[in-house]
């Protein structure tokens, strides 16, 4: 029987190096005050170090320059690079490029890989994923109205998207559009590779969000119009009608990577919570001696531990049975992990008082980013709904009108069950 919570020593060494590297080299990036060009110079030198260590773009298979680690190991790595918003860029696995590279790795044609995937992995081009639309509920994407119509040897695309992360700085977009309006709901859409400089792609704006000033170098969430955009027939990714299937495969591991990064963020907030509780004194002693604060520390530790085990379990399921088989586990941790992240940061802010609310601590920025976690890649409510549906599939409606566990009914049945035995016992007295 295999039931093992340990990490192989050789892999633990890599994680140890990552922890040290992120703390010593990446944390300072968050506060260094040097203009964009110099900032990117530092980022590139750190990326070179990561490549030398063989930890670059680790989410990809070895033939594409990754390590083929699998989701459990990746989860442990993402926990570390989630501690800083800049670490995923330094490690070559920032969203949405990481998910897009997985789509192209698994479903791209040889030409698409050559022209777009390889430069993406080398960090020479950037990408966006364009699915959500302003006028339809993104949580129910079968409603999307962007269309792609085949005319001769070209697809003609018309539609309106928004929240395409990094759309403004992307070189190409992976777009979801309806190609087969009469097909079954989840077979209506296909995915396309659209170079951003194609005529008709109109980058309207980066939508201002709670994340605010942090969005440097054009990072942000773009609103985009696609007006009579013509792309060659072979720009489709995978098969016609396969869009939702690919999206599912893309989003499954992607969500786990987010969840693990959230643990790294939560852990950082937790460290601040604990340290400050020992440092700040009020009403005759350190805050750490107040029971409410002790409750925050204990609750946070328990919730983070639960989220960590749930995330690793979902990752383990993906490794063993593939992302579609792990849907329930992925949805469970998506909404639970987002709440844990939010609550731990919130407690840390509360404990720091006005300092926590100020930008003199990283907590307020972490809090603003954490809020989005309850929305992107499917809002909490949709994941809860999916979890409940999966769970309820294993249940059956009890017969009749009484619950199966109704005590008087069970008592009667128990009497009947043991009647003979009890009768014999009474007769032998
Ligand atoms: C920071 C950020 C980055 C993003 N990046 C991308 C990207 O790169 N590409 C992309 O295509 N999209 C992206 N999105 C969009 C994201 O995927 C959508 O916001 C998400 O799918 C929800 O869709 P919506 O915003 O249209 O909300 P809606 O679908 O309009 O839902 C609104 C609210 O309705 C409630 N709700 C919905 N369904 C149910 C239900 N079944 N039961 C109960 N309540 C329900 C929920 O509370 C939900 O928050 C991003 C969003 C954010 C915030």
Image: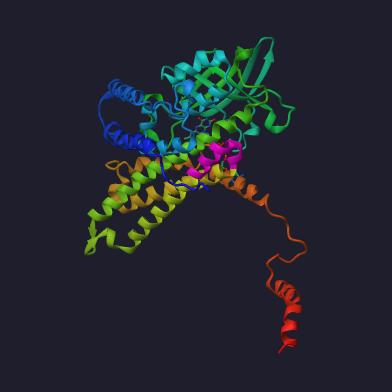
User: Measured from the top left, where is residue 198 in percent x and y?
Assistant: 54, 13
Residue found at the far front of this picture: 428
User: Measured from the top left, where is residue 329 in percent x and y?
Assistant: 56, 44
In screen coordinates, is 182 left or right of 281? Answer: right
Residue at the spot 34% in from the left edge and 50% down from the top edge: 348
Mainly helix, strand or loop, the magenta region? helix
Colouring scheme, one of rainbow, by chain, secondary structure, one colour? rainbow
**Quarter of the C terminus within the rendering:** bottom right
Magenta residues (range): 312-327
Would residue 353 be visible to someone looking at this image?
no
Tally of numbered tags: 0
Q: Of 9 and 327, which appears nearest the observer?
A: 9
Q: Is residue 325 magenta?
A: yes
User: Measured from the top left, where is residue 112 in percent x and y?
Assistant: 55, 15
Would residue 227 be visible to someone looking at this image?
yes
Residue 74 placement: quadrant: top left
Q: Is residue 183 magenta?
A: no
């Amino acid at each position: 029987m295999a039931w093992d919570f340990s990490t192989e020593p050789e892999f633990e060494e890599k994680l140890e190096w990552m922890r040290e590297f992120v703390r010593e080299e990446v944390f300072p990036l968050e506060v260094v005050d040097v203009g964009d060009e110099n900032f990117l110079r530092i980022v590139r030198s750190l990326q070179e170090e990561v490549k030398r260590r063989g930890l670059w773009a680790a989410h990809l298979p070895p033939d594409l320059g990754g390590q083929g680690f699998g989701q459990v190991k990746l989860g442990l790595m993402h926990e570390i690079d989630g501690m800083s918003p800049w670490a995923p860029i330094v490690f070559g696995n920032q969203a949405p490029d990481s998910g897009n590279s997985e789509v192209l790795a698994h479903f791209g044609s040889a030409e698409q890989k050559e022209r777009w995937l390889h430069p993406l992995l080398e960090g020479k081009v950037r990408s966006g994923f364009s699915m959500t639309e302003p006028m339809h509920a993104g949580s129910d994407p079968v409603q999307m109205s962007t269309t792609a119509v085949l005319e001769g040897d070209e697809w003609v695309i018309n539609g309106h998207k928004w929240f395409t992360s990094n759309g403004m700085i992307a070189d190409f977009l992976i777009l979801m559009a309806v190609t087969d309006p009469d097909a079954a709901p989840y077979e209506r859409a296909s995915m396309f590779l659209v170079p951003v400089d194609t005529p008709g792609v109109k980058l309207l704006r980066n939508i201002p969000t709670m994340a605010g000033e942090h969005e440097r170098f054009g990072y942000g969430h773009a609103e985009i119009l696609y007006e009579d955009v013509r792309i060659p027939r072979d720009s489709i990714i995978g098969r016609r009608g396969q869009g939702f299937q690919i999206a599912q495969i893309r989003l499954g591991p992607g969500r786990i990577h987010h969840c693990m990064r959230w643990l790294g963020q939560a852990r950082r907030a937790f460290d601040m919570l604990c340290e400050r509780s020992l440092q700040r004194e009020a009403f005759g002693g350190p805050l750490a001696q107040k029971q409410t604060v002790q409750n925050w520390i204990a609750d946070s530790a328990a919730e983070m531990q639960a989220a960590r085990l749930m995330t690793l379990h979902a990752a383990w399921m993906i490794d063993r049975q593939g992302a579609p088989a792990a849907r329930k586990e992925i949805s469970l941790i998506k909404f639970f992990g987002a709440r844990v992240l939010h609550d731990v940061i919130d407690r840390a802010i509360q404990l720091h008082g006005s300092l926590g609310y100020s930008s003199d601590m990283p907590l307020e920025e972490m809090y603003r980013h954490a809020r989005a976690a309850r929305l992107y890649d499917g809002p909490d409510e949709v994941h809860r709904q999916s979890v409940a549906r999966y769970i309820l599939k294993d249940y059956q409606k009890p017969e009749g009108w009484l619950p199966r566990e109704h005590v008087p009914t069970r008592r009667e049945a128990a009497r009947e069950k043991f009647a003979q035995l009890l009768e014999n016992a009474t007769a032998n007295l």
